[in-house]
Amino acid sequence: MNTSRFGDLEVICRAPAVGTHDHPLLFVHGAYVSAWCWDEHFLPWFAARGWAAYALSLSGHGPSRRRDHLDSYSIDDYVRDVAEVAARLPAPPILVGHSMGGLVVQKYLEHHDAPAIVLMASVPPQGLMGSAVGLMFKKPALLADLNNIMNGTEVDVSSLQDALFHQPVDAAALHRYYRLCQPESHRALWDMTLFNLPQPARMHRPPMLILGASHDHLIPPDQVHMTATTYGRQAEIVEGSGHGMMLERNWEQVAGRIAGWLAERDL
């Protein structure tokens, strides 16, 4: 693993022993986490198969710039982070965005093109309101704990398990993930709810793979299908997985599907 600085942004890179793909992969994390979530499994797995694999920590996340200014960052700031890193890579990257990162990727396409994109359990272009209403009725305690995490308040680690996982997760790993989690920008969350939603008519339309998880409480399958319908695609729902698709026990099924889809397009 090589952790480097692109300006003031943390970027984790896993370089392949032999590069066999023209375009690198750039992974964009969701709310409450940073680049580490991709390096648990995905970055080394894709590097072993010939991709240069990168993951950035958005502004205010992990060791990236100005954690103390977290609440000032908007979705547009996160889009600029992605553009800043993409411009410094050796070739235009294939973008993989999870949850909030998926919405950032959609907003990125309003101003930039990409060889292909993958949306994993992504916030839909209609925003977070539908998800929030669903949580309010089905998982009110989880919604309350997410708000507490956003405010930097300690919560029971079981809330993280409920939010991210459907399959069993090792207790030591769960506590490690919990320690790596962090608050999220209030401004960015409001952007995703109401104020700065994607504008599909303005977006470039590269090849797009849209994945969801059958047991996702945060972005349930109906929200994933809504995204796919907006872009004229068919969603693929991974059975037996929760929201943290890159961390679940069946993560390799998800990685394999992405790799297969890219191979079908000679990417």
Image (spheres, grey):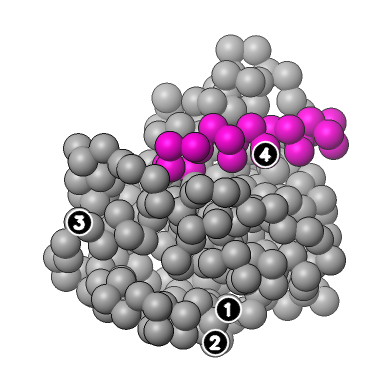
Q: Going from the N terminus, do you reach mark 3 or mark 4 first?
A: 3
Residue that numbered label 4 is attached to: 258
Q: Is residue 264 left or right of residue 45?
A: right
The segment highlighted magenta reads: 246-267
What residue is shown at x 76% (from left), y 47% (from top)? 116
Q: Type of residue at label 3?
A: Val
Between disc 2 and disc 3, whose residue precedes? 3
Q: Which residue is mark 1?
A: 127
SS for dot 4: helix
Which amino acid, by three-letter code, is at mark 1?
Gly
Q: Is the residue under label 1 in contact with that under label 2 (CB below 8 Å)?
A: yes
In the rendered structure, find residue 157 and report the number of the disc placed on it.
Answer: 3
Which mark is in front, 1 or 3? 3
Spatial CA span between label 3 and label 4:
30 Å
Q: Are marks 1 and 3 in contact (CB under 8 Å)?
A: no
* x, y percent for residue 262: 76, 36
Tell me residue 75's x, y (percent).
52, 71
Residue visible at 42% across and 25% down in the picture: 1
Q: Is residue 253 visible?
A: yes
Q: Residue 194 has which mark?
A: 2
Query: What residue is rendered at 43% in x and 37% in y?
Result: 249
Q: Could you tell me if the residues under marks 2 and 3 are in contact, i.e. CB atoms within 8 Å?
A: no
Mark 4: amino acid = Ile
Q: Compared to 159, does 16 lie above or below?
A: above
- Going from N to C along the chain, the mark reached first, 1 or 3, is 1
Q: Amino acid at mark 2?
A: Leu
Graded by Cα atoms within 10 Å as few (under 14), some (14 to 19) or many (20 or more), the crowding at tag 4 reads: many
Q: Sequence order check: which comes first, mark 2 or mark 1? A: 1
- The residue carrying pointer 3 sits among few (fewer than 14), some (14 to 19) or many (20 or more) residues within 10 Å by Cα, namely some
